[in-house]
Image (cartoon, rainbow, N blue to C red):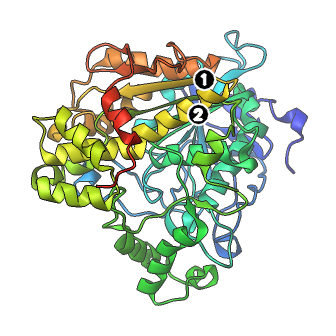
Amino acid sequence: MAENASDVSERVQDGPDARTRGGALRGTLKDGVAAFLGIPYAQAPVGALRFRVPEPAAPWEGVREATAFGPTAPKRPYAPPLDALLPDPDVEGDDCLNLNVWAPWGASGPAGPAVAQAGRPVMVWIHGGSLIHGSSAVPVYDGTAFARDGVVLVSVNYRLGVEGFGVFPDAPANLGLRDQIAALTWVRENIAAFGGDPERVTVFGESAGAISIAALLASPLAKGLFRRAVVQSGAPIAQPLATARRTTEAVAARLKVPATAEAFARVDPELLLAAQTGVTGKGSPLTGGHSFQIAVDGEVLTRDPAEALADGASAEVDLLMGTTTEEYRLWFVPSGVTDRVGPWVQRLLLRKAKVPARTAKVYRAGRPTEKPGEVLGALATDKLLRIPLNSLADARLRSGAPAGTYLYEFGWRSPVLDLGACHALELGFVFDTLGLPETRALTGPEAPQELATAMHAAWVAFAATGEPGWRAWDAARPVMTFGPGLPSLVEAPREAERRAWGSPDAL
């Protein structure tokens, strides 16, 4: 039988154990940090529950061992060369709707003398991976440093690809988002058992995880589940239902089955993954192609998230957001795009991406020594990420949103493959996991620990207080820059390029 609400914070006194509504858990303890891994927050999405809204996990008897990561959502590895740069563990099993908790832990459990009466701040990590890759088992996302510094850290698995973001006439849309909402509901109901404060929850995520968080900020189903949000290298974006359905239809055509959940449920999961990989393998955020996207479905999302947030949705939620300086280099450099793109191809791609002519002219003039492919990448970074996030910050400022808005930029440059300040590079700094080989695959062995210490501390401070340590967004456009060199506050960086996006002229 499930525990009553009054029993949620009861702890088993025998070691790093916690009692949740679903039952008792036993984790591992090292250096004052308890880790509870692979905790189910919903039932396995298989059989009758496949392509269906997540159902709460069934309670269990006795003490459940929570000492290993749970199964990851069905996925394929990144294609070379990204597979060597972005480790993506695969854990087999059906129970992929699980999460992990790292918490400060004393001899008597989480509620030691350092814990305030109301509990510790909680941070919930939503991983990225283009909605087809990634998991909470990625070593870079280890929550030990956050727990060491007084935060209860939760990381979440959710359904990916067509299982999580397929659009069908006979199934709910945005199942992956619904999984995230179910996980956040679990956190609200259970996190006190780990010493966390359910009223001080911060959601944070990168790339597709950040896009997910922007959607959660706009979703009526997620309202009240978190107090603060961090959006790293992702922007508010969603597609109309009919547009989002095109990728599902393309997968169906490749499989030669109807584009219905009923038909897809009869397809072997490995064949489904192969078809999905074939359909999405050549897509690009700049030039289009098939990819899985969050959809405006009328329930999880009732309108485009960018419009909803600009109109004041989640104005009461403190918001920290930003990008890396050279997001594009993760894709353009290893693939050789920066070298292959000449002036003519650059213009062709910018026209296809509907980049204004005057905008491109400003970037070319301001970057006379850069290759056409690098200028193209800078335009892509700003069009897809920096400009939308600046616009959202401006909208919150104009509306007088009661919550704080803070912007950052990560500019330290990795020497690995000349990737520079590329997409995902900041993750090891945020989690303070620079010492791990999986982090060094992207950063190299000489990444500056002092920068990780500063960036990690800013995220901890934001979760605890709503202020990361620098001035909130105002008319002077303050952006905290983390590298190169020591962190510094810069007002209106690359302002001429930002202003150039006001031109309506198409290239």
**Residue bearing mark 1:** 463
In front: 132, or 437? 132
**Residue at screen point 50% across, 36% down:** 391
Q: Is residue 78 above or below residue 224?
A: below
Q: Please state the horizontal and vertical placement of residue 431, each as a whole percent of the image.
A: 44, 29
| 302 w.r.t. 194: above or below | below
* Three-letter residue code for mark 2: Ala
304, 90: nearer the viewer:
304
The 10 Å Cα crowd at callout 2, few under 14, some 14 to 19, many 20 or more, is: some
Q: Quadrant of residue 81?
A: bottom left
Using the image, tell me which numbered label, if any, was put on residue 378: none
Dot label at residue 395: 2
Going from the N terminus, do you reach mark 1 or mark 2 first? 2
Residue placed most toward the observer, 62 or 476: 476
Secondary structure found at label 1: helix
Q: CA distance from mark 1 to mark 2?
A: 23 Å
Mark 1 or 2: in front is 2
**Residue 136 in view here:** no
- Residue 273's place in the image compared with 73, above or below, is below
Residue drawn at x 57%, y 21% is 462
State the image coordinates of residue 157 (x, y, percent, origin top left): 56, 51
